[in-house]
Each structure stands twice: as structure tokens, then as C-alpha cells.
Amino acid sequence: MLSGGKLKLVQAALRLITDTRSLTSLGLRELAREAGLNPNTFYRHFKNLDEFGLQVLGYIAEDMKSGVRQLRQMADTSEQASHDTVAFVYSYFLSNPAATTVAVRELHGPSPVLRRALEAQLNASAREMAEDILERELVAGVTPEVIHEISHMTIRYILFRAMDYIEKPEQREVIQKETERFINRQFRGAMVEHLEELDLHALTRDRQSQA
Amino acid sequence: MLSGGKLKLVQAALRLITDTRSLTSLGLRELAREAGLNPNTFYRHFKNLDEFGLQVLGYIAEDMKSGVRQLRQMADTSEQASHDTVAFVYSYFLSNPAATTVAVRELHGPSPVLRRALEAQLNASAREMAEDILERELVAGVTPEVIHEISHMTIRYILFRAMDYIEKPEQREVIQKETERFINRQFRGAMVEHLEELDLHALTRDRQSQA
DNA sequence: GTGACCGGTAGACATATGTATACATGCAGA
DNA sequence: TCTGCATGTATACATATGTCTACCGGTCAC
């Protein structure tokens, strides 16, 4: 898809983006230097840095999509599904740290163009996730709209945690477990959404007296 | 607390940070220019730009804290409390857009120093929120640890949504409602966390047949 | 074979930046 | 009154950046 110098420049960007750099902070000369090209070659491929940023986003979006596609796997309960999904997604992020960093950073970054683009891509992922849940009937008694809404939140939540997950190896297990709890609480909360608070309290008391 | 030139520079930063700039992207000369000072005056007050960033964070942290302090108000049910809190917090963000933008942007930004500082401040806020919930016994049947965990997530969630809230006036109502649902689902989900999935389904069916 | 085009290069430009040194002013304490 | 110190300024330098114009070597179509 991307050829020659274009590819070199995009990959150079991914190499340059570490803990301490963001996509929008990269300079054209810097990029060319890292790619082993003449500064002016940049102009042969991109009109300006914004257009370049979009290409980078497209590149990593492609990557992420193909990663998420292989996620369709079996799971009997929703709890099991959330566990598997979370494990998979984080391991994916872990093996693509640069792309992940770009996504997290630019989602709230200073370039409106990139923000919109990323948002659109996240929405697409959320939609996919929701439809997957609906098709496999993993959650009962929750309307499709709510499933979409929760998926939307979940996708973002995972993305934010991904940075910590990458940066703090000793916290990975904790983060993973927290994420699972987050998801399960959302869906369980949605299931009992229309119950009166008093009933809920009674219910909780029941459980506690049982134990 | 901050005096003269120091203050001028910090305020200049807040003025410069709009949709399209981030704290870490500001230059020393740029800052001085906006503050109406000589570039070198910057050095009279700050060792480097990182130290400056920390001061800015401190400045807005002060501001936010005093904002959140007046939040202690009455509410009978947790649902009511989440509604009031969400309304209040968003209106606060709306009236301090620059500070909000800084916080959101730098929490995942390229400067590790600022990231850590912001994280610490968010954790403090989360702790405060959790303790408030515990003191006022707004949520029953949920352990303090879980309340802390949910508070932690909620604080972050609200902060992220704050950007959209500021930027997209036509979506403000929706965002506010979504945030309330988010919070309520978390706590309700936590209440029924230890129930078997089957029981939950039965419960949901009950409600549906009632209706 | 020739002309067009694509990808890459070289050099030069105006302009911006961070920083160092040296100078000016005003106010506090002796 | 003199001294010190904090604050602000002026000038200067090395270095980086985006961008412009011009040049070069292949490759493909005709």
C-alpha cells in the first residue's frame, strides 16, 4: 500500500515516537533525517505535516484493524468473553507500542484533524465490538443502544489504560483485572438499570445474609 | 502565591493553549512575547520549560481544588448525587477551558514529569470523591476498595469527556446524561457484582414481565 | 530515442528558537 | 547612603526549522 520513501517516513515517525515525543511534535527535517532521506523528499510525498499525520494514522489503523479481526473467538459467558478480549487487546497494544502511543496521544492532541480521524476510527471499532456482542448474544436483557454506548466507553477506557499497561510492566496484571471489572460492572449495571434502588439494596442484603 | 512576571508567564500559557496547542509545545520566547516580557526574563523565574510546566500545573491544580471543595452539598440518593456532581463538574470545566485542556492533553502528553504530576493530582481527587461517597453513605453494599476504584475511573472518564463537552456545545446534554449513566452503571454493577449470571438474567426477566 | 514524470538530491533563504553575557532599575536592609 | 538582590532588558550567537528553486537519474509511453 505505502511504497518506498512514503513508507520510510511513516516508519521513521513510529520510531521517533517514544515516551517523550508526539506525532504533532515531529519536524519534517527530523523525519527525513531518521528516514535517511533528504528533507525535500518529504514534499514529494506529503503536502504538509498534517497530511503526513493522517497517513500515519491510516497506517496504524490498518494495522489495528487486522489485529482486531482475529479476535472473533468462542466464549460461552460474557465474563469469559471480556476476559479473553481484554487479554488479547492489551497484548496487541503491548506489541505495537508506538502505534498505541500515537493513538492515545493524538486523540486529545493539538491537531483537530487528527483528533477527528482517530475518533472516527474508535467509533468504528466500538460499533464492531457492539455488533459482535449482539450477534453472539453475550449480554442478555440490555438494549442494543446501551450495548453500543458501553462499547464506546470501553474502547476508550482500554486505550487510555494501554499507556500505563505499556509503561508499567509491574502493573499489567492489575490493569487487566481492573479493566475486566470495569466492563463487567458496566454490563451488569445496565442489566439492573431499571430496578428501583430499594430493590437493589434488598438484593444486596440477600446475598450478604447468604454468605 | 505567584507574583509578577511568574504569574504573567503562567497566564500567558493559559491564553496560548487553545484547541490547537499543548503546554509542551509552547516556546520560551513565545511565552515571553505573549506575556509582554523579554525572553530572558523567563530565566529569572524558571530553570527550564519543564519546571515552567510544573508551575502551570500547580496553578491550575490550586484552582481546581478550590472549585471541587464547594461541591459538598446535600443529596439523598446516589442517583441524585451523581446528577448534581456531574452537572457541577462539567460547568466548572466549561468555565475553565484552558486549564481543562492542559489537564486532558498532558495526562497522556509527551512529558513524563507532567504526566506523573497530573496523575498524582487526579488520584488525590479520586480519593476525595471516594471518601465523600463513603462518609455520606451514598452507595450501599459496596466495599470501600471498590468505591475507590470506581471513583478513580470516574474522575478520568469525566476529564476525557470534558474536552468534547467544551468543544461541542450541541452535545453537552448528551454527554452529561451519558456520564450519569456511566457512573450509575458502575455502582449498580458493583452492587450485583457477586451474583451469578443466571440470577441476574432471572432478575432481568422478572422486570420485563412486570412491565 | 525522446520526452515526461517520479523520486531523490543540493544549496540557499528567511526566520525561529534556546541560551549566554552584560547592562539597567528599583527596592530592602545595613 | 551604600550595598545587595531581585527583576527586567539588550545584544549576540549557534543552531534548527520550513520552504523555494534548480538539478539529476531512472522508467515508461509513444
Image (cartoon, coloured by chain):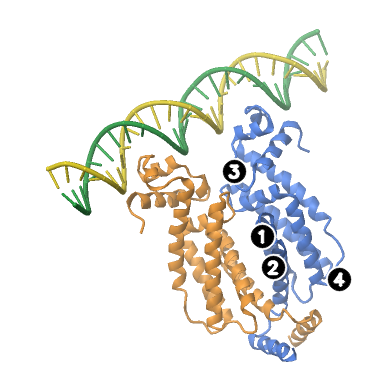
Chain colours: A blue, B orange, C green, D yellow
Q: Are marks 3 and 4 on the same chain?
A: yes
Residue A11: image x %, image y %? Answer: 71, 39
Q: Earlier in the sequence, mark 4 or mark 2?
A: 4
- The local secondary structure at tag 4 comes to loop
Tag 2 and tag 1, C-beta contact below 8 Å: yes
Q: Earlier in the sequence, mark 1 or mark 3?
A: 3
Tag 3 and tag 2, C-beta contact below 8 Å: no
Q: CA distance from mark 3 to mark 2?
A: 31 Å
From the image, tell me which residue sits under label 4.
Answer: A76
Q: Quadrant of the N terminus of chain B?
A: bottom left
Q: CA distance from mark 3 to mark 4?
A: 43 Å
From the image, tell me which residue sits under label 3.
Answer: A24
Residue B171: image x %, image y %? Answer: 58, 62
* Chain letter of the residue beneath label 1 in the structure image: A
Q: Is residue A143 visible?
A: yes
* Chain letter of the residue beneath label 2 in the structure image: A
- The label shown at residue A178 is 2
* Chain letter of the residue beneath label 3 in the structure image: A
Q: Amino acid at mark 1?
A: Arg
Where, by quadrant of the figure, is residue A152 drawn? bottom right
Tell which tag, 3 or 2, sits nearer the viewer.
2
Dot 3: few (<14), some (14–19), or many (≥20) neighbours within 10 Å? many
Q: CA distance from mark 1 to mark 3?
A: 21 Å
- The local secondary structure at tag 1 comes to helix
* Chain letter of the residue beneath label 4 in the structure image: A
